[in-house]
Amino acid sequence: MNTTKKTSKKQIIENYLLTEIVNGHFKIGDQIPSELELSKKFNFGRQTVHSALSDLALMGIIERTPGKGSFVSRHPVNRNIQKKKSFTEDMQSIGMVPGSQLLEFKIIKAKEVPEVAKELKIEASEELYALVRLRTGNNTPIALQYTYIPRKFIEHFDLSVLDKSLESYIESLGYDITGFLTRLRAMEGNEDQLRILQTTNRAILNSISIRYVDTTIPFYYTSSFYRSDLYEYTFSSFN
């Protein structure tokens, strides 16, 4: 996972529009700014804007009508990021059978993933469990997840639990997940991600999630890449 990649101009536009939809500035059926308006607003080329809108259209978030413009067709997803729910709980809530396949497990130094270390507030010399899992619903690939857990929290990791809920395993060890932070962005999947997720749709959703214990202690970090045609998030905004 490349955690230092600079946000592209296209992603800046996508993230702006997603945020506007999240905050209710654009509701379902509303027309969003035109390519020309967005080009002027960000001082980006029309082709960049066109590519960003095309990605959002592929994700089903907007619908583009020739001669009329682009309209919000739905909110990005069917899950509220204000609520602490695991992937397993999400699948069960809609009647799907959750699944998990461990693709990689290793112990690394935090210095190998500096941005993760920063989010977890640990020293570069500390060790992390690094997990890569394919998450499925009814045996269909839905998400590719990269998870990092400081080794100091779990002395002996039981790999046999990883076909179920990681969060349930953590809670069984006596930890209480009391807080979470989630960030979302639209992006283009790379060839490996598309192959593992068994999709040709390059538009995917990336979710960065940090879980906390005792409110302020970061316990683990997960970067998830979701198929936008199969997984939906619901965004909420509170004043």
Image (spheres, rainbow, N blue to C red):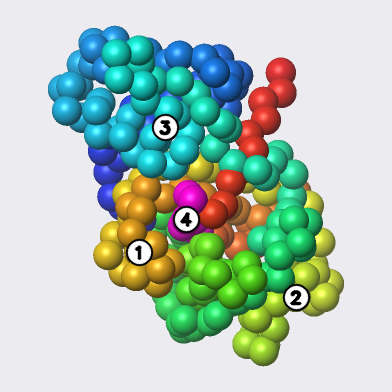
Say which of 187 and 55 sits in front. Answer: 55
Q: Residues within 10 Å of mark 4 (few under 14, many from 20)?
A: many
- Tell me: residue 6, above or below residue 29: below
**Mark toward the start of the polypeptide (2 vs 1):** 2
- Say what secondary structure mark 2 lies in: helix
- Tell me: residue 128, above or below residue 17: below
Residue type (three-letter) at the residue carrying disc 1? Leu
Which marked residue is nearer to the observer: mark 2 or mark 1?
A: 1
Between marks 3 and 2, how big is the CA–CA gap? 33 Å
Instruction: Identify the residue shown where x is 60% and y is 62%.
Output: 220
- Say what secondary structure mark 4 lies in: strand
Q: Quadrant of residue 237?
A: top right
Q: Within the magenta stretch, is there residue 142?
A: no
Which marked residue is nearer to the observer: mark 3 or mark 1?
A: 1
Say which of 96 and 146 sits in front. Answer: 96
**Mark toward the start of the polypeptide (3 vs 2):** 3
Q: Which residue is mark 1?
A: 194
- Say what secondary structure mark 3 lies in: helix
Q: Residue furthest front?
A: 66
Between marks 2 and 1, how big is the CA–CA gap? 29 Å
Q: Is residue 166 visible?
A: no
Instruction: Identify the residue shown where x is 39% and y is 62%.
Output: 199
Q: Quadrant of residue 13?
A: top left
Q: Which residue is mark 2?
A: 169
Q: Which residue is mark 4?
A: 227
Instruction: Identify the residue shown where x is 82% and y is 75%.
Output: 172
